[in-house]
Image (cartoon, rainbow, N blue to C red):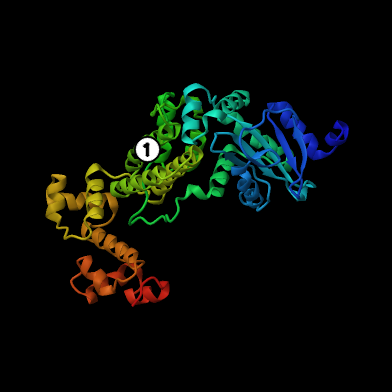
Amino acid sequence: MPEDIVYSDGTGYICKLVYEAYRVQVRWLDAGGSLRLVLPLAFPNRPGAQEHAGLPADMMEAVRRSSEATVPGTGTAALPLLYTTGMLENFIILRLPPDKGYSGIIIIGPVLSAPVTGDNADRLMRDWSIPPGQQENWREYFRSLPVLDRMRWYHAALLLYTLTTGQTLSITELLLADSAQEDSLSPEGSGPDLNLSYRREHTWLHHDPMLEQEMFRHITNGDKAGLLRTQAAFSEESYGLLSKKSQLRSKKNLAVSSITLATRAAIEGGLFWEIAYTLSDFHIQHIEELHDIPAVDRALLAALCDFADQVLGTRSPKLSRVSALCQNYIFNHLYEEIPLSRLAELAGLNASYLSRLFKEETGTAISDYIQQERIEEAKRLMALPGLTLSDIASRLHFNDQSYFTKVFKRYTGHTPGQYKRDTGRITR
């Protein structure tokens, strides 16, 4: 297609602007999936199988999924999708907005966020079992790819979005929406149940420690948007190397380290430590089951966001060490008798003084707080199959079912039976 014809079209002109600005390959696929334009024509060939338009087979599902991407709060199908292949190639995928007179998809990439050379390339090819006869082709391919740091890459996505829609989009909105599109951000079978599930992950090394402190401070404050902004400032080459043989193992080790730090930050933010440790274990176990680096990166970001969300969801006024200690003990020992004398012994205070201090800080007497927590636990137990109301009352140390009913109604406004019928959570 002659250049003046291609570039007189609005979509072709946008493709040319992006290519000239970043010197990264740009493709335009029409609504039927046919390749309309590729810039530049001469570009290093990717070793191995490709599925369509010279694109890696493992990213075609992301291309298909881009049709579901929407701008937050608008429902407009025109949001950039960030995609990283198993070989660490980065792409931006944008379904063009038909309401603006465009059609089809623009794909930018591949680029690397850091050079893949030497030992890094060897470990990556070992992780993916690349045959020896193909390894030099991959090394040459990696050397030929442009390298853009993460922040500049995000700005390329924002530029493409603005050029096609005329609207602005912040990096935070881009990352929040992009993470919402990734199924892998929520480990399969997971649910935000405080009772159990969830676990830990992620670490950044060889960077400015103040940046790390800022990131984990956002977790302590339950600020997911701030966390995403700070995380975007980390460069790929600043990460430490924690495995000499496997790039994937190194990434997993870094993720585990990060989650360990995030766990401490969440506890400092007021999350009960049993919840924080359980969350940590869950995410770490999930990461250990993953088989490629992009999945580990996505899972780590999901874990960090999960900690921030959990802190925000359980945010309470800052308590003294004594009151926080009592609350954690109560949370962990709801299935036992919890006499005031035990809490006083734990806090190292006189029982009457502890009672007064706890009520002044929380607005609730210790005995009432214990009952409230037991009722909340009873509601969670009702979600489990095979438990009768009498089983629940007995487990949580209510003297009998009638007393359990009385206390349950005091705090919820419903009897357990009414709650059961209204929610349909428990079988008879």
Residue 126 in percent (x, y) is at: 47, 32
Residue 197 in percent (x, y) is at: 36, 53
Q: Nearer the viewer, residue 306 or 144?
A: 144
**In which quadrant of the rendered view does residue 211 lie?**
top left
Q: Is residue 168 visible?
A: yes
Classify mark 1: helix, strand or loop.
helix
Measuring 36% from the left and 42% from the top, which residue is drawn there? 266
Q: Is residue 203 visible?
A: no
| Relative to 240, 35 lies left or right | right
Q: Nearer the viewer, residue 49 or 151?
A: 49
In the rendered image, the vertical position of residue 60 relative to residue 16, given as above or below: below
Measuring 39% from the left and 76% from the top, which residue is drawn there? 421
Quarter of the picture containing the C terminus is: bottom left
Measuring 32% from the left and 44% from the top, which residue is drawn there? 318
Quarter of the picture containing the N terminus is: top right
Q: Nearer the viewer, residue 10 or 351?
A: 10
Residue labelled with disc 1: 256
**In which quadrant of the rendered view does residue 412 lie?**
bottom left
Which amino acid type corresponds to the residue marked 1 in the rendered image? Val
Report the residue that reaches farthest toward the front. 133
**Label 1 neighbour load within 10 Å: few <14, some 14-19, many 20+:** many
